[in-house]
Image: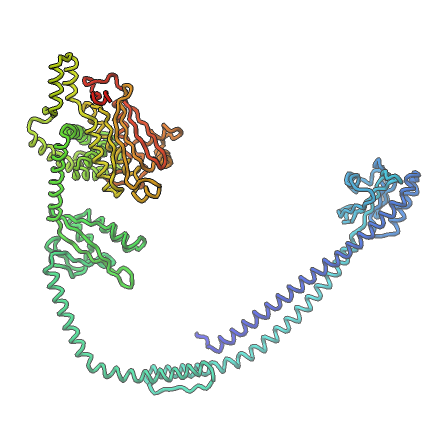
């Protein structure tokens, strides 16, 4: 049952009056209570002050009167004085005088006469407090004694010279204080009850008058509303001539005028609508014809484009309208079909990825652009590859569906792949022409690494080998090999077992093509060819003519099989320059100092192969972008130094970057996560060269896996070497590799050129 507006107004007024009256009652009662409490505190203060004045005067006067009696040892007079004082004043609870030896000369109480000399001890007087008390000062204590609360007044009795003779104690009952407070409290409550009663009476009268007044006001307000309601009902029933007349002089009168205006406008609108309906059928026919023509044109477009257009609803269902080429590529469909179920017949992997990505897009938790970017971009069917693009369909800025555009990129990818293969083969011949010996050593070392990866039974060794192969392939310009290695690393990242041989088949096939191309070009020569300059032959001829010893001639011949360290250093330098430019860090300046060192290519090939990881880390982590270098007060152009030297039968190889220095804090944090020791500087260096330790925030094709430096450490240890890292924040880092040599000479695989010795 609905409640009328009049009843609601009356109820509201009553509720308001009740709330106001209650609040007034509470406020007045509260203020009365607080005032009574304040009055009680004042009364209590006055009574306490009176008791203090009385007790202080009593003790002070009697202390003076007792002085002569005590000095004369008048025990009886002392007792009579205290007893008489106690009997005259009913407020006194007890009286006590103790001499300086704590012997009671007189002790009397209001309740009973003491019988034993030590009965005064039931008072539990704090004797130490009186001893510490100043002479001539009355001490006051309020406490429970002899079953009641009392004010205890005490004072030292001293002789003419100020020497203490004893202590005088009187206890005054707090009865007058409690009686006065009780009477004042009773008066306060009576006053409060009277006030509350009057307020209640006033509140009831106010509510009754308010109800009467509110009923009258409600009647004046609700009558015009009733008239309006009736007019609206008649208007709704079809009577467009209805009008209301309200003369209340307020907003209701304005509302009545607005209703009359609305009724007039509504009548005009109905008349105009009737006129429009006469031509509506003709307009509908024309609009239907236009839509049919547009649909025919759209169908014509969809039937002739070479792109696949599909529309997916918010529920993932395909719309029936689509380009004809979709049916040619993936087959036709009818009815309500989910896109991921339809496309799973062609590419199940794509279908699964799309389903996961579309669910995230519909959930609308992550940014819409991020969800679309993470959806699968490639679709494969029958040896053909398609590129998929996605465009959200929005309604009021909310996702209402998805437009999928599919392009056949098989020919495009084939062309790009063929171009990459030609570029890779061209890079192979350029490397062979530039540094035949170094390149052939790289191919042999890479062949050995690849053979181990295919048959690897240890996941750590496989990770390390793939990372090394990727780095050197990048250095040689073998882009396809490097990308295939990176894909294999991605697949291996979360595995605990090595990749099976089948997973490395694409890498194996591409490596076989490169090797076959190289063998076809070199024939049976390969490493049988020794490259010599005419100067080397002339030197040998001159030494023979000069009658050089046989050992010198043998040393000269043996040196021909050695490789100048400048060649691998230049390979690393070229790679460092290219990588620096690729990362947008400027034009790298590389200083090379081989210092005449010559090494056996085969024995040191593995070391030079793995050293590429140090160069990659120096460029990626060490060198700063140009603007950062300028802000740090450095030359905008980055710099790196590569050097070799033989010092005191030690081979020293150094790679130094003049960058930001090693972030030892990040190394320490990564090492702790791996459970490695980090107490000393050597611990941190070992951690830096340990497997899985990396300071990169994400994995790239350049770094981030923590396997490269681990491969370098194992190679250096296999050669009996030692690694040192000298780093200065903001100045740069030097990686030093030191190898102890049993002998130095061409026949021992390490030599220094005659020019370097002369220098």
Give percent across and percent down for residue 515: 11, 32
Give percent across and percent down for residue 235: 35, 83
Asked whether residue 116 appears in the rendered view, the answer is: no
**At x 18% / y 17%, what residue is drawn?**
747
**Would you identify the image quadrant in which residue 118 lies?**
top right
Residue nearer the viewer, 324 or 427: 427
Residue nearer the viewer, 399 or 121: 399
Q: In which quadrant is the N terminus drawn?
A: bottom left
Asked whether residue 696 appears in the rendered view, the answer is: yes
**At x 81% / y 45%, what residue is drawn?**
137
Residue 554 sits above or below residue 694 on the image: above
**At x 15% / y 72%, what residue is drawn?**
290
Q: Is residue 408 left or right of residue 255?
A: left
Q: In which quadrant is the C terminus drawn?
A: top left
Q: Is residue 689 left or right of residue 747?
A: right
Residue 11 sits above or below residue 616 on the image: below
Q: Is residue 400 left or right of residue 289?
A: right
Residue nearer the viewer, 569 or 194: 569
Give percent across and percent down for residue 633: 35, 41
Q: Is residue 447 left or right of residue 109?
A: left
């Amino acid at each position: 049952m609905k409640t009328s507006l009049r009843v609601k107004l009356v109820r509201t007024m009553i509720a308001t009056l009740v709330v106001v009256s209650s609040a007034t009652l509470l406020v007045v009662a509260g203020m009365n209570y607080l005032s009574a409490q304040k009055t009680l505190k004042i009364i209590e203060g006055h009574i306490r002050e009176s008791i203090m004045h009385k007790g202080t005067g009593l003790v002070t006067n009697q202390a003076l009167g007792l002085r002569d009696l005590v000095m004369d040892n008048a025990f009886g007079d002392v007792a009579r004085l205290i007893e008489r004082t106690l009997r005259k004043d009913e407020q006194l609870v007890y009286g006590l005088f103790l001499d300086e030896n704590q012997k009671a000369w007189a002790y009397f109480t209001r309740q009973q006469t003491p019988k034993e000399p030590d009965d005064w001890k039931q008072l539990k007087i704090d004797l130490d407090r009186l001893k510490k008390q100043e002479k001539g000062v009355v001490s006051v204590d309020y406490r429970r004694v002899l079953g009641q609360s009392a004010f205890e007044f005490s004072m030292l009795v001293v002789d003419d010279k100020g020497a203490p003779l004893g202590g005088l104690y009187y206890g005054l009952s707090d009865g007058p204080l409690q009686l006065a407070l009780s009477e004042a409290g009773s008066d306060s409550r009576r006053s409060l009850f009277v006030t509350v009663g009057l307020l209640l009476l006033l509140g009831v009268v106010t509510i009754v008058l308010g109800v009467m007044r509110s009923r009258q006001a409600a009647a004046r307000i609700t009558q015009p509303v009733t008239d309006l309601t009736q007019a609206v009902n008649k208007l709704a029933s079809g009577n467009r001539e209805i009008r209301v007349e309200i003369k209340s002089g307020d907003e209701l009168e304005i509302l009545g005028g607005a209703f009359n205006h609305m009724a007039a406008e509504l009548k005009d609108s109905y008349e105009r609508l009737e006129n429009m309906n006469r031509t509506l059928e003709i307009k509908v026919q024309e609009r239907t014809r236009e839509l049919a023509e547009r649909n025919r044109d759209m169908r014509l477009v969809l039937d002739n484009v070479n792109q696949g257009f599909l529309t997916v609803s918010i529920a993932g269902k395909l719309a029936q309208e689509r380009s004809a080429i979709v049916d040619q590529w993936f087959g036709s469909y009818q009815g309500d079909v989910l896109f991921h179920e339809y496309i799973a017949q062609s590419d199940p992997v794509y279908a699964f990825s799309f389903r996961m990505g579309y669910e995230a897009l519909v959930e609308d938790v992550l940014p819409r652009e991020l969800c679309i970017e993470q959806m699968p971009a490639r679709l494969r069917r029958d040896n053909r590859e398609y590129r998929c693009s996605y465009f959200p369909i929005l309604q009021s800025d909310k996702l209402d569906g998805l437009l999928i555009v599919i392009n056949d990129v098989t020919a495009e990818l084939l062309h790009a792949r063929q171009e990459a293969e030609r570029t890779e083969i061209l890079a192979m011949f350029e490397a062979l022409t530039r540094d035949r010996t170094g390149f052939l050593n790289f191919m042999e070392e890479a062949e050995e690494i690849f053979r181990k990866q295919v048959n690897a039974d240890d996941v750590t060794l496989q990770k390390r080998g793939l990372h090394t192969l990727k780095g050197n392939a990048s250095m040689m310009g073998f882009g396809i090999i490097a990308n295939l290695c990176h894909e294999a690393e991605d697949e291996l990242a979360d595995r605990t077992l090595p990749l099976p041989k089948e997973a490395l088949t694409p890498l194996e096939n591409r490596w076989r093509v490169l090797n076959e191309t190289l063998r076809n070009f070199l024939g049976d020569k390969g490493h049988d060819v020794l490259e010599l300059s005419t100067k080397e032959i002339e030197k040998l001829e001159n030494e023979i003519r000069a009658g050089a010893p046989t050992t010198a001639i043998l040393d000269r011949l043996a040196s021909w099989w050695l490789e100048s360290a400048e060649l691998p250093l230049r390979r690393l330098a070229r790679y460092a320059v290219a990588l620096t430019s690729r990362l947008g860090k400027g034009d790298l300046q590389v200083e090379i100092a081989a210092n005449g060192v010559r090494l056996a290519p085969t024995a040191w090939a593995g070391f030079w192969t793995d050293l590429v990881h140090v160069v990659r880390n120096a460029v990626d982590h060490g060198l700063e972008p140009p603007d950062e270098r300028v802000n740090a007060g450095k030359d905008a152009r980055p710099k790196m130094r590569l050097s070799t030297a033989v010092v005191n039968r030690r081979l020293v190889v150094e790679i130094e970057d003049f960058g930001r220095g090693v972030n030892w804090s990040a190394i320490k944090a990564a090492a702790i996560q791996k459970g490695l020791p980090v107490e000393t500087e050597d611990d941190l260096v070992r951690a830096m060269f340990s497997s899985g330790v990396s300071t990169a925030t994400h994995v790239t094709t350049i770094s981030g896996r923590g396997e490269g430096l681990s491969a370098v450490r194992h190679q250096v240890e296999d050669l009996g070497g030692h690694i040192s890292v000298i780093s200065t924040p903001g100045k740069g880092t030097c990686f030093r590799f030191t190898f102890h040599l049993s002998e130095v000479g061409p026949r021992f695989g390490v030599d220094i050129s005659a020019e370097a010795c002369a220098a």
